[in-house]
Image (tube, coloured by chain):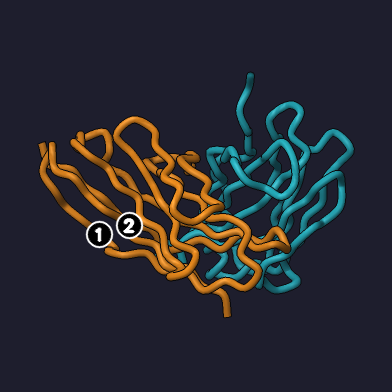
Amino acid sequence: EDKVVQSPLSLVVHEGDTVTLNCSYEVTNFRSLLWYKQEKKAPTFLFMLTSSGIEKKSGRLSSILDKKELFSILNITATQTGDSAVYLCAVEDRDDKIIFGKGTRLHILP
Amino acid sequence: KAGVTQTPRYLIKTRGQQVTLSCSPISGHRSVSWYQQTPGQGLQFLFEYFSETQRNKGNFPGRFSGRQFSNSRSEMNVSTLELGDSALYLCASSLVSPSYEQYFGPGTRLTVT
């Protein structure tokens, strides 16, 4: 059965710290891996990764995919209180089905 | 450009009833996906519609159904409601299929009593 596992489930750090969120997957016919940020409302898209070893970067956030080891990481440097959210990882297969992980709840202390 | 809208935002139903939720995608988007989000199971894919056709379906019982209209608006129906159907139902639209770079609506919070 296809699955996406995120770790840790929750994380509390101080402002300014760097965090690394993990996402591993077992999905047949992998197409892409997606990262979302969910605050109080609906998830917002962060990154889509399709190729191994190519880092995607947006400001203080970056992500990379390892298709051999079947995982991805999301890094956030110099964290701010506004980064507090649930970060969701999802994998899309070639049948256009998307499977979400249960998310990592990140809390940034001022 | 207006975002994805969902109606109603909140709904309370009793067991055995049925419910219809509505989603209007971003103008020009033809793919609409529906998700159920619960604290225990997280975000789970229900189905995706593209050009009025269901392209894919998640592992939900037949009580969950949907459709898409020619203007890309989509509806989701749940019949014979159960307590476990209480959840946040999110709709997401994207420009093309497959559905990546989805834009989510605010969701409909369904409570079944």
In the rendered image, the vertical position of residue B91 relative to residue A4, given as above or below: above
Q: Amino acid at mark 1?
A: Ser
Q: Badge 1: few (under 14), some or many (20 or more) residues near its Cα, within 10 Å?
A: some
Residue in the picture at 58% in, 80% down: A1
Q: x%, y% of residue A42? A: 48, 42
Please give the residue where the numbered disc 2 appears in the rendered image: A104
Q: x%, y% of residue A3? A: 51, 72
Q: Amino acid at mark 2?
A: Thr
In this picture, residue B100 sits left or right of residue A64: right
Which tag, 2 or 1, sits closer to the chain's start? 1
Please report contact status of discs 2 and 1: CB closer than 8 Å, yes or no. yes
Query: Gap between marks 2 and 1, in whole Å?
Result: 5 Å
- In front here: A53 or B38? A53
Residue A10 numbered mark, or none: 1
Residue B2 numbered mark, or none: none
Q: Which chain is orange?
A: A
- In front here: B10 or B6? B6
In this picture, residue A26 sits left or right of residue A6: right
Q: Quadrant of residue A23?
A: bottom left
In the rendered image, the vertical position of residue A98 relative to residue B7, given as above or below: below
Q: Residue B18, can we see it?
A: no
